[in-house]
Amino acid sequence: MPRPLVGPVPGPAPSVRRVGRTGSFCCMGAVLLLSACSATAGEEPGAARVPAPATTPSPSPAAPSTPAPDPALDVAVVAEGLDHPWDVAQAPDGTLLLGERAGGFTAVLPDGTVQELRADLGDLFATGETGQMGLVLDPGFAQNRRLYSCQGVVEDGGAEIQVIAWTVDAGWTTATRVADPLVGDLPANERIGRHGGCRLRFDPAGALLVGTGDTADPDAAQDPGTLGGKVLRVDPATGEAAGGNPFLGRADADPRVWTYGHRNVQGLAVRPGSGQVYAAEHGPRRDDEVTLLRAGGNGGFAPTGPGYGEFVPMTDLSLPDVLPATWASGEPTIASSGATFLAGEQWQGYEGLLLLGVLKDRGVLALRVADDGTLIEQFRLPELEGTYGRIRTVQQGADGALYVTTDNGGGDDVLLRVTPRA
């Protein structure tokens, strides 16, 4: 049944407004346990831009060009009554597709109609941080109507995480499984659903990237033979290792592994132009991190035993092939989540920024990153600072707008459309 109409997707967005819950949302799957990924309070919100410390003297500049101004932003609610919307993607026709953690796909049509899709989610494992998580549309969606989801699944009396391929009918009423699973045997924490990952994005070569969590297993992240605590790179047609992967032919490694040594990958963002891939992760008691990835690189997380000993650096620089963090939160953590780059001249001074959804500290963090992956500056977007609660996903749509999902629970979550004010 369609949800209450909030407003059409295209066209200029109104000024910032808050909309309360006007309807309920029926979810499939188990009832979620609302859980936080970090236990301490975050940094003070509303901070001014903070430049990264210089490591080498800067040469005397030539006459500077006038920088583009920072735009004022308009924020509009385009769908409400959602429950933990974990990811969002925009189709070529302008339709927005959401996946909700307790189960279900929701489409926001170009005329503003919000409708649930019929989908077989009877085997969904939704506990704690795990459930229906990442989703992404196939680059050829206009022709093949294919999408991919990453979700917990009840399997053989236990649970695992799987990447499943679906097709969607032209009317956005039904999603049908076509590769079930495309990628299976991803580990899940069956007891409390901790560290399930799981973000999906495509790289410029057309390979599907899958960011996974270590499921609080102390041995997973540093073992290239397992799939937990990794970024996988697979062929979206077969689920097998993509060509050029760094561990092809190695007996001690799974060939689908692209990078390893991760704690809990929450965001993946591909930089326009360069094709660089950045990952956003939750740290333990300090150091949420953003890292520029490279094939075969080690994220550097290595919890100690016995048990899951997390009193270790988020990135241990003594490990082999380690990838230094571009940005780290320090202490306390802020629970950084989804990530996206802003592209397009309409964003003026914000063009090229890497944005992060912030759960615990409730907002959107903006990072300006140099071509080599070093941090230039960081600041928070004032229009989204503390206004809408926990921010799960930020994603630039095909129309150039920024789409943002909240993660407050209780059926009170919203999808936001953010645009630069004309």
Image (cartoon, rainbow, N blue to C red):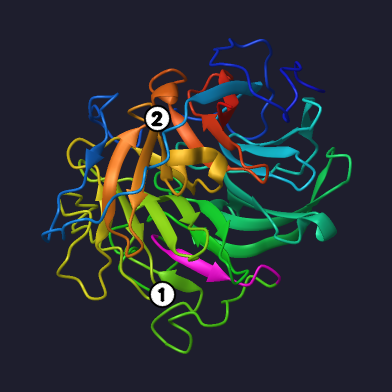
Q: Residue at x 26, y 57 (%)?
A: 325
Give the residue type that dot 1 points to.
Answer: Ala
* Residue 397 location (% of width, % of height): 63, 43
Left or right, 377 with reference to 306: right
Disc number for residue 381: 2
Give the residue type that dot 2 points to.
Answer: Leu
- Observer-side mark, 2 or 1, equals 2
Q: Residue at x 38, y 65 (%)?
A: 293
Along the line of sight, the residue nearer the viewer: 120 or 13: 13
* Residue 17 location (% of width, % of height): 55, 13
- Height in image: 24 above or below 293? above
Q: Which residue is mark 1?
A: 295
Distance from Cα at disc 2 to Cα at disc 1 = 32 Å
Q: Quadrant of the C terminus?
A: top right
Q: Which residues are magenta?
A: 229-237
* Residue 260 location (% of width, % of height): 36, 67
Q: Answer whether labels 2 and 1 touch (C-beta < 8 Å).
A: no
* Residue 379 location (% of width, % of height): 31, 35
Left or right, 78 with reference to 272: right
Q: Quadrant of the N terminus?
A: top right
- Height in image: 308 above or below 80? below
Q: Judge whether residue 192 can be spotted in this image.
A: no
Residue 407 is covered by the magenta coloring? no
- Answer with mark 2 or mark 1, whichever residue precedes in sequence: 1
